[in-house]
Amino acid sequence: MPLKLQGFQVNMFAEITYIVWDPESREAAIVDAGMSEDDEVRAIDNYLSDNELTLKYLINTHLHIDHCFGVEHIKSKYGLGLMASKADEILSSRLKEQAQMFRLPIDVENISIEHDLKDGDVLHLGMEELKVISVPGHSPGGIALYAPDSKFVITGDSLFNRSIGRTDLPGGDHATLIRAVTDKLLSLPGDTKVFPGHGPSTTIAEEHRFNPYL
């Protein structure tokens, strides 16, 4: 039975927080916990509770602030350590600076990465796999999460519907991002559904044909 995926659009950046879960084991992962308001936090907690899910993983595709607002809540409530690429520690250790850069009226604490995710790592939800794909360029340690049996990939801010991630923020590099998306994401099967960190979903085949940046 394929993995289920539910997206929640949250915070002032319209970031999408995903819950991925296995309907047989009820094991779940939360990806890019960006909840910044109490009602957004409640929506995530209620979804987990209503579906009787056991949260197994707290994962970030990267550590820009709009993907991090809810990380500490998940850490404390569910007793999980953050899984992300250590290459993004330059961002997670400077969340306060990021908040100041965007002039956000939010008090945010810097966060630590407890589990370093590397290209080729495999996580399990029940019998299903989530494969870690390194996609640097939007940030130094950007990753995607690919579920081959369920035919979808969560791309964070590396690949969007008809677009790619910005590379003008600290740690970004345009050539690196284009190379990573082309080599690591566009090489996936064309019918793979793409779930980005902002905006509507797409497929690998559609991005092959219509993405003007690639």
Image (cartoon, helix red, strand yellow):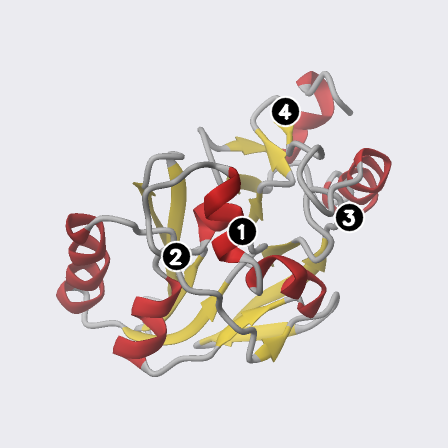
Residue tagged 2 = 33
Residue 68 percent location from the top left of the image:
44, 56
Q: What residue type is labelled 4?
A: Ser
Mark 3 near mark 4, Cβ–Cβ under 8 Å? Answer: no
Q: Residue furthest bottom?
A: 79
Q: Which residue is drawn at 58% across and 41% down?
A: 157
Would residue 12 appear left or right of 112 to someone viewing this image? left
| Other residues around mark 2 within 10 Å, as few (<14) / some (14–19) / many (≥20) | many
Q: Give the residue at mark 1.
A: 97
Dot in front, 2 or 1: 1
Whole-angstrom CA distance, mark 1 to mark 3, is 31 Å
Residue 28 figure quarter:
bottom left
153 is higher (above) or lower (below) than 57: above
Q: Earlier in the sequence, mark 2 or mark 3?
A: 2
Marks 3 and 4 sit apart, C-alpha to C-alpha, by: 16 Å
Q: Assess whether mark 3 and mark 1 are in contact (beta carbons under 8 angstroms).
A: no
**Mark 1 residue type:** Glu
Looking at the image, is mark 4 or mark 1 earlier in the sequence? 1
Mark toward the start of the polypeptide (2 vs 1): 2
Residue 203: image location, x then y, percent: 58, 33
